[in-house]
Image (tube, rainbow, N blue to C red):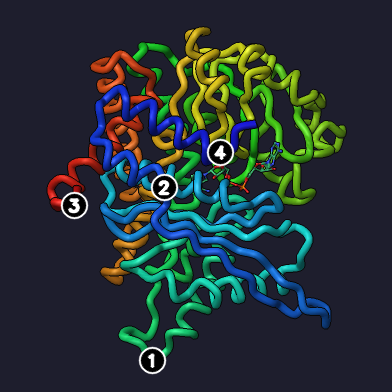
Amino acid sequence: MVNAFKMVQSQINNAAKICRLNNNVKSIILEPKNKISFSFPVKIDNKTEIFHGYRIQHNNVLGPFKGGLRFHPDVNLEEVSALATWMTLKCALQDLPYGGGKGGLTINPYDYSQEELQQISRGFTHALHEYIGTDKDVPAPDVGTNPQIMDWMTDEYNKINKGGASDHIKSVFTGKSIECGGSQGREEATGRGVAMCVKEWAIQNKIPLEGKTYTIQGFGNVGKYAAKTMESFGMKLIAVGDHGGYVYREEGIHIDSLIDHINTIGSIKGFWGPTNGYHCAEPISADEFFKLKTDVLIPAALEMQIDETRAKIIDCQLIVEGANGPTTEDADKILKDKNITVIPDILANSGGVLVSYYEWLQNKQNMSWEKEDVIKKLDVKMGQCYNKIDQLSKKYNCTMREASFIYSLQSLEKMYMNKGLI
Ligand code: NAD
């Protein structure tokens, strides 16, 4: 199977060919600038465990490296390199003054208590601190990390740097809790941005969303908030899946009940039990989930979830990629032949980094913006970004993924040219 890094390289090569990108720029973007990999010890239950972590700093021609930290058992150098590359392209797509980076730790966070996770997060920050900084590299949450982990890391970073230029720098991490300097609206930003893409697509194609159906794979930060926003459009969630299983309910799944269930149990598993009036969704297999007829499908879990086999059975009008890299290139070709529109990851899930940027700005100015203002800015920016890519895809007669890559690569090309670096 093609790994995620080979996939993003191939996506870059493909878009570069369409827009005749400068070859030197292409060569630069195809490889990460810095690959940092490290190990560090943490004492757990009187035993010393060694943890393995990475930070890939892909490109910083547009500004400081920016990107999440993933805690997951499958984290490896190739995966983090791919995610860092997508970050460079995503920030360029949203015209943000950031480059791309990504980090990860190869652990299953669910195997550890909160106290242990805190020690691991602080150890990770020790190993990372010399490479990051508010104008150097700004990490954020991703799969398996959350605002609490960002709070611990920000605190540890500032303890290490005590006596430096500033006593407490909040803007070195984004995605923190509100109490520790996080932004209003950051938690829901990625999922809401995904839903705003659905809304914009519906407006452009004159499709009323009321009563339209959708399915979601992954009901974590992104999936949950996409569902909450799409519920407010009058749409109906008919199936959902996570690492604990998949469920289906023709009349629509009650989203708040599902959120309560996951908060209690840790996954969808058991949501089919008759615990209360709403818990009557029926369990289905992953294959049955992807085969379902639905208007919109949202992959919001991990990479490579839609492969050739699944692309062949998918029956929907629109796929909006909440996750990074959920569709393989072979699957992409099949979806195109089936006339299914795909709103690609670097566009669809860019709401997260957008509001991370707002958090960074607020921290630097020692201000905090009202939630209403943040959400309004997010909605407007997502709409504008969707429309510029929609128009570019018409100009080049290409898919929205190709158009998104073209926009980002051309922005990077202009920057290299203007700086006289190529
Ligand atoms: P999360 O950890 O909050 O949720 C991940 C979800 O995926 C969970 O519901 C989990 O059960 C599910 N999942 C994991 N393995 C699975 C499997 N094998 N099959 C089905 N479901 C599985 O993570 P998140 O922050 O919601 O991120 C989800 C995706 O969105 C990732 O690709 C991430 O890189 C991307 N993303 C997240 C953000 C953000 O702001 N959180 C921003 C941009 C992109």
Name the N-terminal-most of marks 3 and 4.
4
List x then y, in percent, for residue 378: 34, 43
> Which numbered dot is residue 4?
4
Name the N-terminal-most of marks 4 and 2.
4
Type of amino acid at the residue the image marks with label 1: Gly
In the displayed structure, would residue 210 be above or below residue 21? above
Type of amino acid at the residue the image marks with label 3: Leu
Type of amino acid at the residue the image marks with label 4: Ala
- C-alpha gap between disc 3 and disc 2: 16 Å
Type of amino acid at the residue the image marks with label 2: Glu
Q: Secondary structure at mark 4?
A: helix
Q: On the image, numbered disc 3 is attached to which residue?
A: 421
- C-alpha gap between disc 3 and disc 4: 29 Å
Kindly report which numbered mark, 2 or 1, lies closer to the viewer in this rendering: 2
Task: Give the crowd class for mark 1: few <14, some 14-19, many >=20 residues within 10 Å.
Answer: few
Question: In this rendering, does residue 349 appear at all?
Answer: yes
Q: On the image, numbered disc 2 is attached to which residue?
A: 31
Q: Quadrant of residue 294?
A: top right
